[in-house]
Structure formats: C-alpha cells, structure tokens
Amino acid sequence: MARMSPSALRSAFVARYGRPAARAARAPGRVNLIGEHTDYNDGFVLPIAIEQSLWAVAAPRHDDALRVYSDALRDLQTWTLADGPHADAPRWTRYVHGVATLLRRRMPSLDGADLLITGDLPLGGGLSSSAALEGCTALVLCGLAGCELPLEELAAICRSAEHEFAGVPCGLMDQYASLLSRQGCALLLDCRSRRFEHVPCRLDQHALLVVDSGVRHELASGEYAARRRECGEALKLLRRACPRAAALRDVAPADVARCAADESLRRDAGAMRLLARARHVVTENERTLAAAAALRAEDWPELGRLMSASHASLRDDYQVSCAQLDALVERLERCPGVLGARMTGGGFGGCVVALVEVPHAQGLVAQLNCGGDPAAPRPVLRVVPAGGAERCAL
C-alpha cells in the first residue's frame, strides 16, 4: 500500500528543512459507496478508504511555531500555535491549525513542529483530502508529543477542527473512514451510536472506478451548510407525523409521503422542497443498509442498482449534483459492464464512482482517460478498499 518509501519521506523532509524527520504518518482518502448527506442526520454511511493517501512528516521544534509545507500546493506557511495563521492564509492551513490547536488543548505539552505534507491523493475531487490532511496531522503530532489517543477520539477531534476552523459542518463519515477503515472492507457506520462494522468487499470479479468530473467543489461556500439547515427545518415539519423524531434518521419514507400528500403543504413550494430533502435522507438510509446486505451476499447487480438510485435521489430530491456529474453518470450507465454509478462526496462537483465488471474495466478506463476527446482526458482511478490511517516507519 505504501506509495512513498521511508527513504523518500526522509529525503523529502531533509531537502525542505535541512534536518532529519522524527515521525511520519499516513491517512487515506475515501470513496463513499453509498450513504450521502446522511451522516449529519444521525444516519448510516458505507464508505471505503482508498490507497491514495496523504503523508505528514515531522520533526519537533522547541518553540511555539508550526512551519508547514504542502508539497502538492508548493506552499510554505508558518504561524505560532498561540496565534494561528494570519487571516488571509490559504484555506488548507485551517485544517492543520485546527487539529494542532485542539490537540494542544488535550495535550498541553505539545510544542511546535516542522511538517511536510505530501502524497498522491487528489485535492478537491470529493475524495476527502481534508479528512486525510486532518488525520495524518493528528497522528504525527501525537507521535511527536508521545501521546496515544484512541482513533475514535482523534476522529472526533478532526471533525471538530473542520467545524470550528474550516467552517464546514460535516458529519463523522470522512474522519471515521480515513482513520478506522480495514483493508478489503467497507465501513458501515451508524452515525448516531458511532458503532461500525467492517463489511467484506471482495472485488475479485468487479472493479470500482472513480472518475473526476473536472468540477472542483467548495463545501464551505454555502450550499452544504444550507442543506444541513434545510434538514433541520424538514425535521420540524415532519414532527407533525413523527412527534418523537430526534433526527431524520427516525423518520420513515411513509411519513414523508403522508406529509407530502397534505393539501395545505402541497401549495407551499418551500415545504415541498424541505420534504424532498427529507425524502432523500430517509430513502438513502434504507439504500445504505440494503447495500451493506448486498455486499455481504456479494449481490453486485443489487449494489449497482442501489448506487444508481442514490444518484437519482441526490440529483432530484437533494439537488447537490451538477450537470457535469449527471452527464458522467448517464454516460457510464450506458457502458457495457457498468452495474451502477453515482456521485460521491458532498456534491456540487468532484467525482463519480462506478461499479464495473472486471472484463470491461480496462477498456472503460482507456475510454474515459481520453474522454472521447484526446485533448480533454478525464482522470480515472481504480480503487480498492484500503486500511485506515497509521504511523509510518522512517
């Protein structure tokens, strides 16, 4: 799995900082097979970690400074733990700053550090590079401080960093997938109880292809937060039928249908929009549990059908897709050997994941890599369920 050898990590760090590294950690990206926008509604998700990862390589400092270099962005930023980055610092620094600040509250002995962030995980493509950045930073800083924290606690710290410092009100899925996944398995996570199950995902005769739409997304731009607010408003509306519901997870599709049939609500476009948001969440929870059952039974056609149904719901009811994602899904679903396809991630751009029979996978990759137009190739990754974050030898 390790795409960067210890010697390569050591050499890269010395080339940047002129001194040896002390610690290194890796955190993978993730692809969500199904269960989109359910995590912040106390629902169910079914992601896999992927081999593509970010690495954090670090050496301690004896002052309060964090000096961090992003290899992918060719950007070096420095700030003190007490003050944080300046107001106009690049957005990626917020994730590192947030994790370091929250860890220091937990571990007052944490000093400054020199960090190098490198890897092969595409940024901004819906593969959760933010959670990977948080996870590898958390692990390497804990290593420097000589402190071991449970992975579940680190996942909660990383999510809080995203909330408080990056301004993205995400659920727990990305952090749990990056930190707690197991090789060869999908992670079925109950986002209310935080219980999870490693569901075997044996891709002997099937492949998962991740295709970049070419549209970058920015979840903090407002739409992601707006959907979360709409879910809260929809829950208030649905309490007419489900007075004890604490989250949309507690609502059934039949409850949404009854409210949608109410004549007083049918004349209210805003109410119908909120019910559509709720319909996606409650049906997506059902699809996610059914997808986990399909994986256990190795019923690949059923898994593909559920993935395609998920995309239709995200497109029509939740309205977080975009024209490029929709066109890509439609094109993939017409290809021989494709059992299902859907957008993956928060939406508004990013990637599509497709379930493909192996005999058709190589030809489809070649076709997509030129996108029908050799001048405009589409990046395609063939991914497999990988293990979660780990400290790395140097």
Image: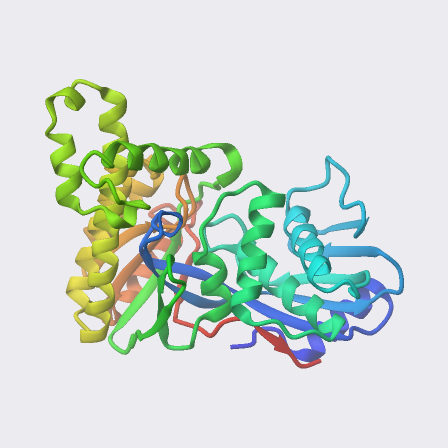
Total count of labels: 0
Picture quarter containing residue 34?
bottom left
Indicate the colouring scheme: rainbow
Q: Is residue 63 left or right of residue 87?
A: right
Find residue 66 and report its image quarter.
Answer: bottom right
The quarter holding residue 145 reads bottom right
Instruction: Give the image location of residue 143, x and y in percent.
Output: 70, 73
Q: At which x and y percent is residue 271?
A: 25, 25
Q: Is residue 136 visible?
A: yes
| Residue 54 placement, left or right of 270 | right
Q: Residue at x 54, y 59 (%)?
A: 156
Q: Residue at x 32, y 65 (%)?
A: 208
| Residue 185 left/right relative to 126 | left
Residue that appears at 57% across and 57% down: 158
- List x then y, in percent, for residue 317: 25, 37
Q: Is residue 249 above or below residue 54?
A: above
Q: Between 312 and 243, which is closer to the camera in this rendering? A: 243
Quadrant into which the C terminus falls: bottom right
Kindly tell me whether residue 331 is visible in this rendering: no
Identify the residue at horizontal 18%, vertical 75% (top origin): 297
Along the viewing direction, whichever of 249 and 356 lies nearer the viewer: 249
Residue lying furthest top: 267
**In this orientation, which residue lies closer to the viewer: 122 or 248?**
248
Depicted 89 relative to depicted 22: above or below: above
Q: Work out which residue is located at the far front of the displayed protein and give it.
A: 244
Q: Residue furthest right?
A: 62
